[in-house]
């Protein structure tokens, strides 16, 4: 339109355009060769350059027509430059041939194109700015992506688990260092290979079926779960592995990433634990049958010894002298005592073995109940007893009862020779945790022997003064241990003893139970 | 009881047998005591089989004192079989044994024992336990009708 407009406005232009009845520019330059050729060369170079620039722009627009926005602007700019170039060629022409009308027409055309470009250009400024900004943002995004990618790479490359990515055909796209080590493959050998190279042949069919099913139906079987599989190293050696797979999509294609862990060691460890548990189970069973046997078989002959010694004393006592009777009394007492020892031992074994319950136990009530029983058993004794009110502990009621029975029974027993017997049950805080104590002002013991205090059948007092089996405190310690706690004592001969104990917070208890129950039973026998 | 019913003692240990009999005698329990020395013999007596073929089965013991550890068939099995039989189902059975192990207690009661007494080592205590048993099961307690025939 712009090109033919002047012809429409000025119909005679076509014939008059090349009217050369004017003076050529040569005369203006006085035909001085220096000036003339300077103009010719300069204008020609300018014109050629403009043409070259336009050609480059045209090529750019043509070749990048998909990506380059504002194509019209480039074309207008190219046209503007071509037109400018044209004016310079005409300048060269008019040095010799004075076609000034044509020259004017070219200038009008150039002016039109220039004005149009100049007018349109400001309107596009905001859009160009947005474009420039977009380019900058995308450059920043690219940088950020690069950082992310670097971070991701660092994570995957240093991960101790194997990481493998594959495309929807199941071809390996990537595997990290750990995966390479796991399968003993260099990257170059596996990238592009189907995943089946990493698995034993017997799993190929199932895997391919699963892959196909997922891709066609999106039915999820293993995606998002951890499954136990078998991997195959390059040398064909198989190993167990735990695998979790995720599927992701990009550009309409599905990809898979799997995280793999060689579970050989884990499997071995589990197997070891299983074996040890089985051994413990056997040891426990043996202990059980041992204690059953003790319970049944050891007591039976003892009963005969006691029973027939008694019968002898009763039936034939008259024909025995005092020494003979005394011997029989000794047999009776000894067999009786052995019966008590066996019972104590069984009780200790039972304490170590029985299933524990955990509940809130009123420690104060337990203590009161036991003391009232002790008082009932020896109504003539006067013991001043102080029990701190509202003491509660977490534990097995029956075991805690047995423990307190022993501790209070001891306190009761060892104050039997005191004029002003005192027993105290209370609590105090140590390292922020409650500890409990049972205190008496009885016989006490030499702290030198404190180490023997909690051993089975260990006694620090003469049985003639204070009878006992030596099982009580061993049982007490066992019960405290089964509650995850500890017990210790302070004493002074003739001044009394204090037994302190702490029960661990509930959480830490269960773990120690099963093991300690067994090992301690072993220690006992 | 007027007809002075029998006591069946199932005990393999001769010492325990003698001591039990002594304890009964000591407490003036004069009922006839039938002693069987293993589970098979006890069942033969109760069902009139084997050595007791032809025994008058209308006469059943008023009390069975049953040890647990027995040759051939143990006490728990004897208990199970006599509880499964219509004729002996209701007989009072007192487990008289050395053990106080939890499984023994649980199994005994589970199979229908009426009482469980652990034999003490001390004979005096044992005699006292037997006295209580005799007093309770032979005098205080009313026996189930079938055993009165």
Image (tube, grey):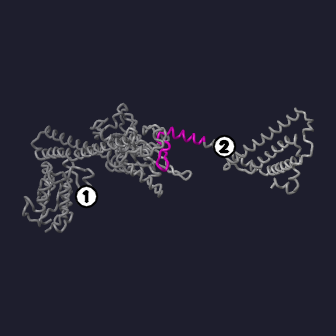
Q: Give the residue at x 22% y 45%.
A: A293
The residue that disc 1 covers is B109
Image quadrant in which you'd find residue A457: top left
Disc 1 chain ID: B
| Residue range highlighted in magenta | A146-174
Residue A163: percent from left, percent from top: 48, 43
A111 or B3: which is nearer to us?
A: A111
A29 or A297: which is nearer to us?
A: A29
Residue A95: percent from left, percent from top: 88, 40
Looking at the rendered structure, the secondary structure element under dot 1 is helix
Badge 1 local density, few (<14 within 10 Å), some, or many (20+)? some
A29 or A283: which is nearer to us?
A: A29
State the CA–CA distance, disc 1 to disc 2: 85 Å
- A251 on left or right of B85: right
Disc 2 chain ID: A
User: Can you say whether A326 is above or below B12 in the image?
Assistant: above
Residue A248 in view here:
yes
- Nearer to us: label 1 or label 2: 2
- A169 on left or right of A457: right
Badge 2 local density, few (<14 within 10 Å), some, or many (20+)? few
Q: Quadrant of the N terminus of chain A?
A: bottom right
The residue that disc 2 covers is A139
Looking at the rendered structure, the secondary structure element under dot 2 is helix
User: Can you say whether A349 is above or below A9 in the image?
Assistant: above
Taking the magenta stretch, the answer to whether it contains residue A150 is: yes
Taking the magenta stretch, the answer to whether it contains residue A53 is: no
**Residue A313: image tag:** none
């Amino acid at each position: 339109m712009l090109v033919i407009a002047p012809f429409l406005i000025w119909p005679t232009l076509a014939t008059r355009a090349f009217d050369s009845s004017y003076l050529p520019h040569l005369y203006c330059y006085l035909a001085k060769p220096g000036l003339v050729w300077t103009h010719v060369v300069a204008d020609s170079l300018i014109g050629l350059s403009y043409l070259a620039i336009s050609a480059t722009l045209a090529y750019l627009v043509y070749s990048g027509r998909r990506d380059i926005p504002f194509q019209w602007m480039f074309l207008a700019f190219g046209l503007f430059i071509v037109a400018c170039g044209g004016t310079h060629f005409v300048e060269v022409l008019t040095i010799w041939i004075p076609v000034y009308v044509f020259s004017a027409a070219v200038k009008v055309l150039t002016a039109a194109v220039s004005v149009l470009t100049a007018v349109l250009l400001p309107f596009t400024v905001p859009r160009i700015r947005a474009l420039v900004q977009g380019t900058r943002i995308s450059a920043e995004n690219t940088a950020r992506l690069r950082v992310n990618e670097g971070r991701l790479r660092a994570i995957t490359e240093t991960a101790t688990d194997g990481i493998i990515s594959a495309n929807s055909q199941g071809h390996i796209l990537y595997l990290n260092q750990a995966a390479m080590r796991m399968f003993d493959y260099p990257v170059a050998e596996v990238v592009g290979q189907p995943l089946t190279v990493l698995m034993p042949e017997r799993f190929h069919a199932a895997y391919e079926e699963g892959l196909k099913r997922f891709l066609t139906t999106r039915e999820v079987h293993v995606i998002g779960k951890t499954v136990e599989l078998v991997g195959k190293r390059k040398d064909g050696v198989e190993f167990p592995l735990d695998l979790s797979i995720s599927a992701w999509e990009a550009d309409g294609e599905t990809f898979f990433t799997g995280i793999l862990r060689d579970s050989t060691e884990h499997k071995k460890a589990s197997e070891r634990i299983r074996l040890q548990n089985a051994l413990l189970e056997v040891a426990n069973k043996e202990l059980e049958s041992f204690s059953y046997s003790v319970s049944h078989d050891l007591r039976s002959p003892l009963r005969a010894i006691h029973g027939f010694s008694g019968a002898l004393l009763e039936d034939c006592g008259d024909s025995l002298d005092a020494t003979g009777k005394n011997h029989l009394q000794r047999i009776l007492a000894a067999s009786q005592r052995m019966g008590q020892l066996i019972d104590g031992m069984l009780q200790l074994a039972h304490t170590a073995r029985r299933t524990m319950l955990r509940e809130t136990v009123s420690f104060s009530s337990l203590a009161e109940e036991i003391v009232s029983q002790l008082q009932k058993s020896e109504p003539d004794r006067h013991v001043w007893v102080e029990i701190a009110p509202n003491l509660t502990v977490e534990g097995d009621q029956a075991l805690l009862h047995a423990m307190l029975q022993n501790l209070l029974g001891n306190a009761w027993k060892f104050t039997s020779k005191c004029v002003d017997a005192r027993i105290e049950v209370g609590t105090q805080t140590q390292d922020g945790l409650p500890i409990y104590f049972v205190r008496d002002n009885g016989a006490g013991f030499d702290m030198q022997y404190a180490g023997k205090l909690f051993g089975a059948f260990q006694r620090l007092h003469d049985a003639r003064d204070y009878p006992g089996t030596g099982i009580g405190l061993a049982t007490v310690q066992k019960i405290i241990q089964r509650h995850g706690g500890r017990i210790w004592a302070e004493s002074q001969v003739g001044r009394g003893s204090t037994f302190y104990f702490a029960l661990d917070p509930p959480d830490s208890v269960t773990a120690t139970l099963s093991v300690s129950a067994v090992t301690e039973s072993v220690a006992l026998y | 009881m007027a007809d002075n019913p029998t006591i069946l003692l199932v005990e393999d240990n001769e010492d325990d047998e003698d001591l039990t009999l002594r304890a009964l005698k000591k407490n003036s329990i004069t009922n006839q005591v039938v002693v069987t020395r293993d589970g098979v013999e006890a069942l033969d007596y109760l069902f009139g089989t084997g050595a007791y073929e032809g025994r008058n089965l209308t006469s059943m013991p008023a009390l069975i004192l049953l040890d647990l550890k027995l040759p051939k068939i143990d006490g728990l099995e004897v208990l199970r079989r006599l509880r499964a039989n219509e004729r002996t189902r209701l007989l009072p059975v007192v487990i008289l044994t050395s053990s106080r192990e939890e499984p023994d207690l649980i199994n005994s009661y589970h199979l229908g024992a009426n009482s469980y007494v652990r034999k003490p080592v001390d004979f005096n205590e044992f005699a006292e336990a037997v006295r209580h048993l005799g007093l309770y099961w032979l005098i205080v307690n009313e026996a189930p009708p079938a055993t009165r025939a």
